[in-house]
Image (cartoon, coloured by chain):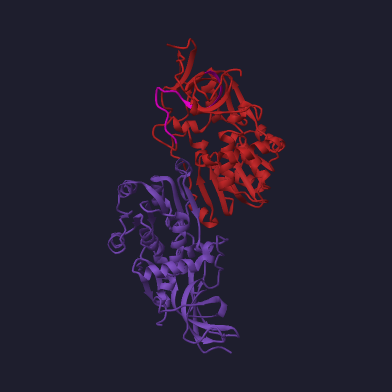
Chain colours: A red, B purple
Amino acid sequence: MGNSLSNQTIILLSRPEGMPTERNFEFRESEVPEPQAGQVVVRSIYLSVDPYMRGRMNEGKSYIEAYRLGEAIAGGVVGEIIQSKSDHYQVGDKVLGMLSWQMYNVVEAKALRKIDDSIAPLSAYLSVIGLTGLTAYFGLLDIGRPQEGETVVVSGAAGAVGMVVGQIAKIKGARVVGIAGTDEKTQYLEKELGFDAAINYKTAGNLRDALQQACPNGVDVYFDNVGGTVSDAVMSLLNDYARIPLCGAISSYNSTDEDLGPRIQTQLIKTRSLIKGFVFADYAARTNDGLQDLVKWLSEGKLKYEETIVEGFEHVPQAFLQLFEGKNLGKMLVKVNER
Amino acid sequence: MGNSLSNQTIILLSRPEGMPTERNFEFRESEVPEPQAGQVVVRSIYLSVDPYMRGRMNEGKSYIEAYRLGEAIAGGVVGEIIQSKSDHYQVGDKVLGMLSWQMYNVVEAKALRKIDDSIAPLSAYLSVIGLTGLTAYFGLLDIGRPQEGETVVVSGAAGAVGMVVGQIAKIKGARVVGIAGTDEKTQYLEKELGFDAAINYKTAGNLRDALQQACPNGVDVYFDNVGGTVSDAVMSLLNDYARIPLCGAISSYNSTDEDLGPRIQTQLIKTRSLIKGFVFADYAARTNDGLQDLVKWLSEGKLKYEETIVEGFEHVPQAFLQLFEGKNLGKMLVKVNER
């Protein structure tokens, strides 16, 4: 048996304590097995690295199963069918799936979705019209519900989810204020994406004062990707009946200390505000509605996106680690093969 | 002019810093003025003292205007019409209103609502079928939405709102666990009100462990009246898609320190839970729906209530202060006149 194709897999060697390092991962080589009936071989083109993966590296269930020690890391992958024993796929088809961090994945056809690069570049299926775009779409519109003239603040605004959130809020007629961690990012948000204001939380001095200036009418929607002290500052500026979609808390993912801060309950009562945690899976049944809008806005030029693409399978762990240094503008992807 | 009736008024003399004391209040005497056309004179029978009043004693707007220095404290009052220059009221009518802490209030007829002591005792209009009962009703059913077989935890469970919350949750078929601060209260909740379990947070040792034991299937709804470390413990036991109506945070009302604790964002994301602050006024338009159910459950014996009644107008400040020592079982009222 065997395929004469040599595979590489990135496995979780040890669970990170605090900030992950490359030593938590190991590259293993193997032979790509022959596909069985109903299976296909997918050659990876782009791998997605995402902050939520950090949670899966811990022991114990969160909203998604933990990665197992000694087994492959998995995530969003775009690839090309190079062998098919399924009626549903032909060699050359481009596909999307939750697959292992491998050069080749041998999987059941039903684990994949066919994608069409005449609609958008392949990489977009992992970003603006993928999990991150849909996460932004449903969190903002279903929980945040921005109304025309309201003020929407988004943290992690130059990240993959954040920049889609801000642009959809603009489409809905809101005033949009982004928070990010470099001047390059804040300038991009203001100049390229049309945010009404963007604040560099690292250089703003008193973030609450800076936010208050950028949000003269207070905050109606806070789309939170980061948690921590950035969120503490935003929470103090909520208007009555504010809505807070909780998407991520990247500031705390690698902390080994208890995440202590001002309790928010009193502020929520005073303003009768709503906070809700969510993940895209909560809205999976409405995927097509979301994609329809996102693709339409893309084609109308109302929605731009940015990708930070690292080249080479050997750099996947490094690209993942860079997420926590805020090295990415938009979606962080690794290109592991030419198409 | 004048009425030959001597009045007493309790005014806010100074804004409390931290725990209020009797020195923050002053009793003033005056003559009761003659009612003008459209006005009535109400002789107070019961005055309501409530934790939310503490917030109104601070400077600055919360969800309701601050009391003004040198002016009367106001709150829920049940009384009897003793003079009427309105077609809507006759002497002897019993009424409910948001009135001043006074022996007599001279007010416009439209500031009052007529109440019927054949449906329930007068005091009930300030408790189980008043603001507190309706607050419990709408917060639990609109935000908490308990389903049959789910677990509902309520803090401040032996207070006016908490004991109605627990009983409605039982009516809806939930497992109900109450948290209170004395053994007398926990025994009352278990034995008289049929709570499945009640925990004395002051003697429980590790509250989280005690809660975990009382909630073997986790927590689906947490009706929060207290905030602080009690809430920290409950938050760590949330099930997926938990709902948390935020009604009060009495543990922090008198604190002069910043209210620091574990940030809850990560837990909310992991469980995709919802928290919402609310006050009864958000549901004022649906008052009659709520009253209909509450009166029905009362008449069916499914809803019991308890009142801690202090006698004498001179004891109003003291009764208010006792709220923060947890001296009350159920609704704290002051009886200032016989009916």
Q: Quadrant of the C terminus of chain B?
A: bottom left
Q: Nearer the viewer, residue A249 or A112?
A: A112
Percent coordinates x, y for residue A112 in the rendering: 52, 28
Vertical position of residue B152 compared to residue B263: above or below: below
* Furthest residue toward top: A4
Residue at 48% x, 57% y is B142
Percent coordinates x, y for residue A283 in the rendering: 52, 41
Vertical position of residue B103 compared to residue A259: above or below: below
Highlighted magenta segment, given as a residue range = A64-83
Tell me if residue A75 is in the magenta stretch.
Answer: yes
Total marks in image:
0
Instruction: Answer yes or no: is residue B192 visible.
Output: yes
Residue B335 sits in which quadrant?
bottom left
Vertical position of residue B302 compared to residue B267: above or below: below
Tell me if residue A334 is in the magenta stretch.
Answer: no
* Furthest residue toward front: A87
Residue at 54% x, 67% y is B67
Vertical position of residue B42 compared to residue B251: above or below: below
Percent coordinates x, y for residue A68 in the rendering: 40, 27
Instruction: Answer yes or no: is residue B108 visible.
Output: no
Q: Nearer the viewer, residue B135 or A128?
A: A128
Percent coordinates x, y for residue B219 in the rendering: 38, 48
Q: Quadrant of the N terminus of chain B?
A: bottom right
Residue B172 sits in which quadrant?
bottom left
Q: Nearer the viewer, residue B176 or B34?
A: B176
